[in-house]
Amino acid sequence: MANDQYRNSLGLAQPKNRPKKLLDGFSNRKSFSKKAVPENHRSSREARSEFGSSPSSSINLKEQFLYLQNQHQELFEEYSVLKQKYRALQENYERLKAEHSTLEDDYNTLKSDYKNLEESHKPFNVRKILQLKFKKRADKESLEKRNIIQNEACFNTYLEDVIKSDTLRIPRIVVECVTIVESSDKFMKSPGLYRVSGNHNTIQNLRYDINSDNYKKLRKQKTPHEVCGVLKLFLRELKVPIVSLALLNQIIPGPSDMIHSRTIKVLELVNSLDELRRNTLRFLMQHLKKVADVEENEMDSTSLGILMSSCIFNETLSDVCPQRFEATSAVPRECTRTMIECYEEIFVL
């Protein structure tokens, strides 16, 4: 009491939980010694006690167990998938590692070879190079005698030396060109067939392939003019033509002999040829007759006779005056036209 009076006199605050009586302080000391329990903590503890004491606690535990079991199964499946991906990546890594090792070895080998070549390289002799550059070239005849330049397998050679077809026993190049042109309606109907010139560079490249007995690029041509150009080039460059002018002048001396019985004269000319030339000429005239029968290409027997006579008879155009050339080319032109128009009477009957 004295303390209270003393505190009041000093104006100090009185303790709120102080017991009013001495006995009350001893009886309630337990409540004052304990800390106040938080509301949320007390509610969770009560909830746990209620859950444990509830009759449905076993059902909730089973549901939780099944849920956790499903979660475990899903996680295990994801783990299996990731494990497979990891193995695939590990195998890919090992493969790339091996390839890298191989490339590195190759690089080191090339590097050492280059270093050896660089060390062994000798400075070139300018004088020697100039001597080789300005050295007089040997002519074609000397190179042919030394077998440096040899006859081509197909072009600029003899008809007897050209590779023959397995079935018809005539030059294979003739069979290939004719088959390619006739196999396409677009080619057969192309305007100016055998009159329009093909690309010169393409024809020369095809020439090298055909000399190597390679006809793949020839069969892949998009237009017929290069194929026809190859065939005309082959016929023009024969060292001995299919029909020589000497034989023609012997049987048909001049244009006047073609006025009467021209079919009989041309038949006599064809029969005087050897078997290889006669069969080649028959196959070629059969093809030209098919070309002349197609109206869309605008090539009749007269036009084909003018174009193909110079190839079949191999007329020489150089150093010839117009009057003499007209007299010389008139008979071959009429012979070619007659062989196309009267193909059955000359070659079949």
Image (cartoon, rainbow, N blue to C red):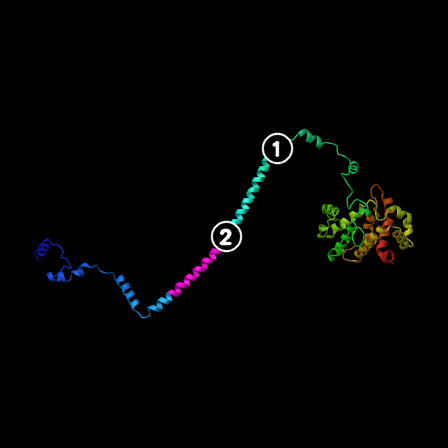
Secondary structure beneath dot 2 equals helix
Q: Position of residue 7 (x, y in %)?
A: 10, 54
Which residue is at the front of the view, 5 or 211?
211
Q: Position of residue 116 (x, y in %)?
A: 60, 35
> Which residue extends farthest top?
127
Which image quarter holds the C terminus? bottom right
Residue picked out by circle 1: 120
Whether residue 21 is visible to the viewer of this picture, yes or no, is: no
Dot 2 surroundings within 10 Å: few (below 14), some, or many (20 or more)?
Answer: few
Which quadrant would residue 237 be assigned to in this image? top right
Part of the protein shown in magenta:
65-91
Q: Position of residue 28 (x, y in %)?
A: 15, 62
Whether residue 246 is visible to the viewer of this picture, yes or no, is: yes
Instruction: Pick whichever of labels 2 and 1 is earlier in the sequence.
Output: 2
Q: Label 1 sits on what residue type? A: Ser
Q: Label 2 sits on what residue type? A: Leu
* Spatial separation of the CA atoms under disc 2 and disc 1: 46 Å
Dot 1 surroundings within 10 Å: few (below 14), some, or many (20 or more)?
Answer: few
Residues under numbered marks 2 and 1 in contact, where contact means CB atoms less than 8 Å apart: no
Report whether 229 appears left or right of 326: left
In the rendering, which numbered label is found on residue 89?
Answer: 2
Q: Looking at the magenta stretch, what is its main secondary structure?
A: helix
Q: Position of residue 160 (x, y in %)?
A: 82, 47
In the rendering, which numbered label is found on residue 235?
Answer: none
Decide: is 28 above or below 306: below
Secondary structure beneath dot 1 equals helix
